[in-house]
Amino acid sequence: MVAPTEDQLRFDGRVVVVTGAGAGLGREYALLFGARGAKVVVNDLGGNFHGQGKSNAADKVVEEIRAAGGTAVADYNSVVEGEKIVETALANFGRIDVLVNNAGILRDRSVARISDEDWNLIHDVHLKGSFVTTRAAWPVMKKQNYGRIIMTSSNSGVYGNFGQANYSAAKLGLVGLANTVSIEGAKNNIHCNAIVPTAASRMTEGILPDILFNELKPKLIAPVVAYLCHESCEDTGSIIESAAGWATKVHFVRGRGCVLRTAIDEDVSPEYVKKVWHRVTDMSEAKHLNAIGEASLGLVGVLEKLRDGQNNENSVTETFRYNYKDAILYALGVGATVTDATDLKFLYENSPEFSVLPTFFILPGLLAVMGSSLTANAIKHTTFDLTNILHGEQYIELFEAPPTEGALTTISTVLDVVDKKSGALVITQSDSYDEDGTLIARNQSSTFVVGAGNFNGKTKAGPDVKALAPAPNRAPDASVKVATSKDQAAVYRLSGDLNPLHIDPSFSAIAGYKIPILHGLCTMGISVKAVLKQFGGDDPSLFRAAKVRFTKPVLPGQTLRVDMWREPNNRVCFRTVVVETNAEVLSGAYVDFKQIVVKPNMTAGAALQSDAIFAGIKERVAENEAKAKAINAVFLYKITSSGKVAKEWVLDLKNAKVYEGPVQGGKADTTMTVADADMVELALGKLQPQTAFMKGKLKITGNIMLAQKLAPLLKTEAKL
């Protein structure tokens, strides 16, 4: 016997029973357990794969185990008398730790030709035999608070197979048995899993093609079963398929389904079932349920919605799945570019700061509403088509940091309908939840339906509809110009808004435009991105909410100017104007931040990221000169870019001044040299000063101790 290695999975002191262990898979299981220190009961009745005849197969396997230095005994009882097999284990070794229910026979016949004998014998050996043996081992395992049980299923049970109705029924029955045993055994540390093996054996010889038969070696499956039976394996209630040195987990999944009535007191008709059958059988949003309770809970949820009247024509639920490709495509659609180094985190999934632009999370609600009849159901007094629809306003709010990939379940409802005389304004609200049920995003979309007004409806939106914020009557605090490309709409539409108005010249001509126009939400995405860069440190985690009104269209290729005003309570109002025509295309707009990080006016020319940090420090020094002067020192920052000093900033806290350039009228008490990006990381708290200093990212000369007094100034959220 080979000496065990330190990390080898061992079964020393364990007693393992393997049924049907005289050949094939059972033999390989028994040999492997014996080689790993287990005391093995090799059970085999000795018949052929039809369950006929006798042989001394079990004795031969026992001899092999003993010859290799292991311990084993033979057992010749039928599995339908499983208690006798367990008695063999107890009489020889005093316990049973592992039971591998492997015994099996075949009696293949077509459904019409299966006799009662063929049916009963297959079920006796496979299903009843596994149950009886498990039942006999159960009290022993329960008393010792430990047990590992394997049920052997088959692809014939999982998928069905011609000529094996009896066999496939028994094999799928073993999956149900394993599931229940795993549930009942959990509190006593008894695990039960089902193996679905495909192996060359006397049962499969002549059935499988030679090329497949020759590669389906039973010894390649044995290690999978051995691990499932080891004390370190935490799986229970799993279905594991294995063949030819490959293994996977098999799940039963349930589709999202479809409610077949709209109220709790309404009946279901066959005609309606036919109408929605495509939704009943849709498996695109299938999910695995871990327990029967989850299935029941889902039905309770359906009934609660019916009682509350939520399953009606004014509500729709959709699941939005996305990954890094979707996030990157959206970023390209709203103008992110590799020519701007700070945009790389939106375009490269392996970037250590990979992030999703906040306005990307408009998409779940947008696509849910676009793919539904919510707007049409809200306006029943007239008909309309896509050429009558205009996107009026959009609001988005993020409640939690969204994951960079995953699935969001979005519930969309009609929030309000307003009669604007020249048209109807339909306001929908979409709440998006992650897989844990946490509210991630809320969107409100106002859709203006031209010509659908004058229906004697309410003339003002209710208080739940988020209001706009008019721009202040003063010069902008910052302005940014962003050029769009002629392909902007063609790229943006790939994120899901496939309205032909933005790509098809003939369709846009019908709507009155010379060429396809840019999506309003694309203009919004470009604008919010510019505001985020200017006042949010290009950090999506600082974004809270945004609202815009779409006033005029933009043509792809035009240049946008985003004018911004910093307001109290971390709000930045903005408007977006087309430079070529001076037409205002977004108005009443704002972005709310968790915290504002100020950058110098981008119209002033090239700037470093860290300029925003020093602009913020300058503000805080001006707000409280006394505390600044109390530090009583002059600090010189040398900010590097590409390894060279690009700028110098002076914090003259003796005189409460902060300015760009060399020290004026004296010398610095402390000089610090740091890269532009690292300065931003320090200010945002993502890089600790001590760590930066130890790694050589922050070099300090002069009075090092004075540098510690700067901590309150450097934190972007701090006040002096």
Image: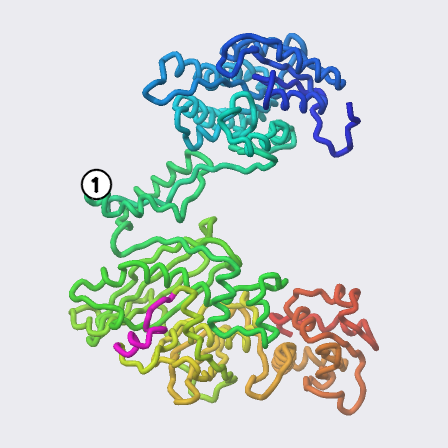
Q: In this view of the protein, can residue 317 be seen by the observer?
A: yes
The quadrant where residue 254 appears: top left
Residue 557 lies, in percent from the top left, at: 44, 82
Q: Is residue 561 above or below residue 525?
A: below
Q: Quadrant of residue 195?
A: top right
Count of number-bearing discs: 1
Q: Which residues lie in the magenta part?
A: 497-510
Looking at the image, is 677 positioned above or below residue 168?
below
Residue 545 % position (x, y): 45, 68
Q: Position of residue 505 (x, y in %)?
A: 32, 77
Residue 502 in magenta stretch = yes
User: Which quadrant is home to the N terminus?
Assistant: top right
Q: Which residue is mark 1?
A: 268
User: Residue 576, percent across and down?
Assistant: 43, 81
Amino acid type at image mark 1: Val
Please tell me whether mark 1 sits on a helix, a strand or a loop.
loop
Q: Compare residues 230 and 26 and report the one nearer the observer.
A: 26
Q: Quadrant of the C terminus?
A: bottom right
**Residue depicted at x 50% and y 59%:** 402
**Front-lying residue, 350 or 34:** 34
Residue 104 is left or right of residue 427, and the answer is right
